[in-house]
Image (cartoon, rainbow, N blue to C red):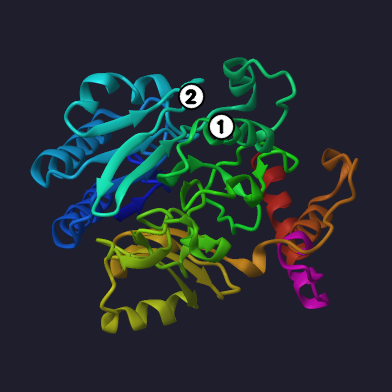
Amino acid sequence: MRILHTADWHLGRVYHGVSLLEDQAHVLDQLVGLVRSERPDVVLIAGDVYDRSVPPAEAVRLLDETLTRIVVGERTPVLLTAGNHDSPDRLGFGARLLAEAGLTVRGLATADVSPVLLRDRYGEVAFYPLPYAEPPWVRQCLEDESIADHHAAMKAQVERIRRLHDQSRRSVLIAHAFVQGGTASESERPLSVGGTGLVGAEVFEGFHFVALGHLHRPQSLAGGRIDYAGSPLKYSFAEVGHDKNVSLVELDGQGCVRLERLRLTPRRDLRILSGSLDEILAAAGDDPGRDDYVLARLTDTSALLDAMGKLRTAYPNALAIERPQFAGAGAGLEAGTDHRKVGLDELFEAFYREMTGRALDESARRLLHTEISALSQQEREVAP
């Protein structure tokens, strides 16, 4: 059984005020091309199809177009589950009708854990799509008051599957969860606070393959049997070092897994540039990625006029500027100090310490005092 596993599309994502919809369409076109060239028996999409519960119309159209190309154009069945960003009711609309065409959508978690059965030359494979659900919802569905966190919720659902599963069939689980041992990125929305969102990997014992969504870095656990395909695009500058892929999985007759990552190439990469503004601008002429989305970490210590405007003359899709040396290592004014009772000299010195972690030297302090005195004199001269 050949399985193409993907997740975390986040259609409709806006990053630093820029819509990524065209970038998403670009990588999804590559995904359709991989379906055409690799001829998987099924495509699994493990949640977070949309970036928010009420997606923009353009994101809905892109999903419709992509799924139509795969299911109708390539005649490849798709199993799709809701993630924590999706609205389960909206995503699951028309699911029974769509299933007739080869698109299985599981939006709202229910007590029904019946599998989708697909056949290869070795026999049937049972696919169990589990949509994301908060623990209180699972507690209500399964009528189990002991369910208090995500681990317990996943364990209860999986144990229900085990009780009903025909052991003569190979089994594949599709879920959306933060499995303990996985590596997170800053672009994922936390499932909960205080660690209660974690699910132990031991919950998935017995399944031949587990296709997961939620973590955006591609990674495998349990020797490749548990897999995060990751997001198809970089959704934060913390992900600049990630490769973005989909997972091609081969499940043999005994249920052994062979996994290959198929790389996706973005329309524009997400990169971080470091150096002074002049250095970055000077190097741009030889940079083949001038259209990339860029964060510039500037080493300049002096004031810069219209730094973003200048940066965008070289990198038109620059998204942000950071000045790490001004991130603030000093204590500034002590908490509780009333700034209205502090002189301008002291306020500025505190601000300078907060931004640079250094105190003003004596010559700078004299210059500051001279300028403040001159401004005060001008204010007195023009006062009515």
Q: Which residue is drawn at 47% across and 42% down?
A: 167
Q: Which of 329 and 112 is in front in this view?
A: 112
Determine whether the residue tagged by mark 1 lies in a helix, strand or loop.
helix
Q: Is residue 122 above or below residue 310?
A: above
Which residue lies under the disc numbered 2?
A: 109
Picture coordinates of residue 155 (x, y %)? 64, 36
Determine whether the residue tagged by mark 2 lies in a helix, strand or loop.
loop
> What segment is highlighted magenta in the picture?
353-367
**Mark 2 surroundings within 10 Å by alpha-carbon count, few (fewer than 14), some (14 through 19), many (20 or more):** many
Magenta highlight: main SS? helix
Which residue lies under the disc numbered 1?
A: 163
What type is the residue that disc 1 sits on? Answer: Arg
Q: Which of 321 and 1 is in front in this view?
A: 1
Q: Which residue is drawn at 50% across and 46% down?
A: 214
| For marks 2 and 1 on the same chain, the one whose residue lies earlier in the sequence | 2
In the orientation shown, which residue stands out farthest toward the front? Answer: 168
Picture coordinates of residue 292 (x, y %)? 31, 65
- Number of numbered markers: 2
Q: Which residue is drawn at 38% across and 41% down?
A: 126
Is residue 292 something one can see in this rendering?
yes
Is residue 19 something one can see in this rendering?
no
Picture coordinates of residue 75 (x, y %)? 12, 43
> Distance from label 2 to label 1 (Cα)?
18 Å
Picture coordinates of residue 59 (x, y %)? 27, 35
